[in-house]
Image (cartoon, rainbow, N blue to C red):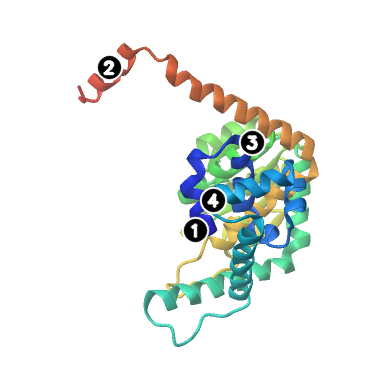
Amino acid sequence: MFRDKIQNAYEELSPRFRVLADFILENTLDVGFLTATELARRVGVDPATVVRFSQELGYSGYRELSREIKRYVNQQLALRYQKGAAETEGLTGQIGMLIDEMSDHILDLKADVGQIAQVAQAIHTAQRLFIAGSAEGYHVAAVWSTYLNFLGIETYPLYADYAQAAAMLRDAEPGDLLIAISLGLGPDVEVGHLLGAAREQGMRTIAITTSPTLLPARQADIKLVTLSKTPAGYPSFDVLMAVLALLWQALATLDPQKAQNNVKATLDTLSNLVAQKDKVPPYDVAALQRLWGLD
């Protein structure tokens, strides 16, 4: 299959061929409808490079590679509109049903598109952004905070205990925004108290939760509830994570130039950090090994 061939040959590909490989793997559904000339234009190479790339993978040319991609695309499109077969048994059947349920949950988000846009605008115009959570919710907040920082949005993850909350509220200003994430694995009472205190302080508040009855949802100015029940009875985090991903992408489109500049600057810094490994003296590595008893 073309994806396996690309992945197996990737290390040996030239830089131009790698650009083509990345585009095909990341945009396969689009590539299925592109000619060699159109694909070359999208990637920024000449059509002859597309043909040579196909031959490098073992195909006679792009036409043969394109036929295989089209077959894959047709299979994927068919799967997207096909519900799990009732006669399928075992783990495969269970996963098929779970995928159908997740697809239905994602489609339900269309009803909340206006509210999601409202949250994105609030983040975009915030003077400072705090993202709070407790227990597992804090870890989700921290990950999302990192992604927002990639876009150049100054974000502060906050564990919802009273000491940290007091320090944040002490310096809070009306233009600041507090977003609370509540997965529904616990009552998140501390998160609710933090939202209530922030509102009294004049901050804008948003709760992204899995239940409208949780205290954070009742205390926030804007509540974005991602209802998602599972057969196990536990609240699911799939839709909530999808909402966070949607918000991140929406924020990138609100100021695309700023987002691109900040992502590029982050990648440049990452490259510099990776390059540092070649500058570490052997005795520093040996010292670390002694510390961990590895020498």
Type of amino acid under label 2? Ala
Where residue 85 sits: x, y (%)?
Answer: 50, 84
The residue that disc 4 covers is: 57
Q: Are marks 4 and 2 in contact (CB under 8 Å)?
A: no
The answer to whether one can see residue 59 in this image is yes
Label tally? 4
- Which amino acid type corresponds to the residue marked 1 in the rendered image? Pro
Query: Mark 3 sits on what residue?
Result: 150
Of labels 1 and 3, earlier in sequence is 3
Q: Residues within 10 Å of mark 2 (few under 14, many from 20)?
A: few
Q: CA distance from mark 4 to mark 3?
A: 35 Å
Q: In the picture shown, does residue 156 fall above or below 278? A: below
Rendered residue at 67%/54% (across/down): 246
- The residue sitting at 61% across, 62% down in the picture is 69
Label 4 to label 1: alpha-carbon separation: 54 Å
CB under 8 Å between callouts 2 and 1? Answer: no
Real-space CA distance between mark 1 and mark 3, rounded to the nearest whole angstrom: 31 Å
Closer to the N terminus: mark 2 or mark 1? Answer: 1
Q: Which residue is mark 2?
A: 286
Question: Which residue is at the far bottom?
Answer: 87
Crowding at mark 4 (Cα within 10 Å: few <14, some 14-19, many 20+):
some
Q: CA distance from mark 2 to mark 1?
A: 48 Å
